[in-house]
Image (cartoon, rainbow, N blue to C red):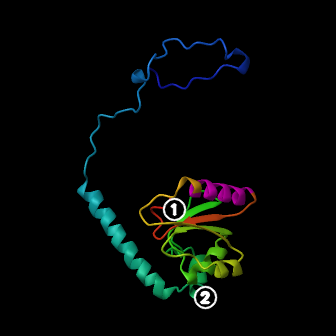
Amino acid sequence: MSLDSITPPPPEEQDDVRIANAPTSTEEVPIAVVLNEPVKFSYARWAFTGLVRLCYRSWTRIAAHLFPENSRSEHIARSLHIPLPDRLNMSWINSQLAVGGRVRPEDVYALSDVGITHVIDTRSEYSDDAEALAREHIELLYLPTPDTYPLSIEQLMEGAAWANDRILHGGHVLIHCEHGVGRSV
């Protein structure tokens, strides 16, 4: 079976079109292309990436002391495009949706600063301070879920509907749990 793209026929011709040599069962359809090339381990790459990680960790410690958040030195460093460590434990999925870990009380202002307008907190062990978020004009949806457990279907439906509605109205949504790798994702 060829992996070339097939252009679909116009809608008026689709009813009586049959694909020649089409597989008759799902067993004949390849699920994935298997490459016979083995993955090669490289000591040079392993050592280099390890060195880069160590340098980055060292730099983040130094930068945290040299360029405190919202200081004049931080603004100068950012204007000179000096790479500084991220302020928030979050990653943007697209221009309006982010996922991440817990929001510390001192980071609420930074959330507003990066444009977050709505937060979904999925932790059952803690809850974000709704009043502190409201002072920064950030709306909170609390969907308590125990750690290492998935959200219920009802919570998923409620959270998805809430987030989609806010995004459709121009909002920027952060979905977070404690570490940003389980319930929020």
Residue position marked by numbered label 2 in the rendering: 72
User: Of residues 180 and 150, which is closer to you in this image?
Assistant: 150
Horizontal and vertical percent position of residue 100: 52, 66
Residue 163 magenta-highlighted: yes
Give the answer, above or below, for where 144 lies relative to 43.
Answer: below
Within 10 angstroms of label 2, few (less than 14), some, or many (20 or more) residues? Answer: few
User: Of residues 72 and 13, which is closer to you in this image?
Assistant: 13
Q: Which mark is residue 163?
A: none
User: Of residues 185 and 91, which is closer to you in this image?
Assistant: 185
Q: Residue at x 31, y 68 (%)?
A: 51
Q: Residue at x 69, y 78 (%)?
A: 134
Horizontal and vertical percent position of residue 166: 71, 60
Tell me which label, 2 or 1, sits earlier in the chain. Answer: 2
Q: Residue at x 66, y 19 (%)?
A: 9
Q: Secondary structure at mark 2?
A: helix
- Magenta stretch, residue numbers: 155-168
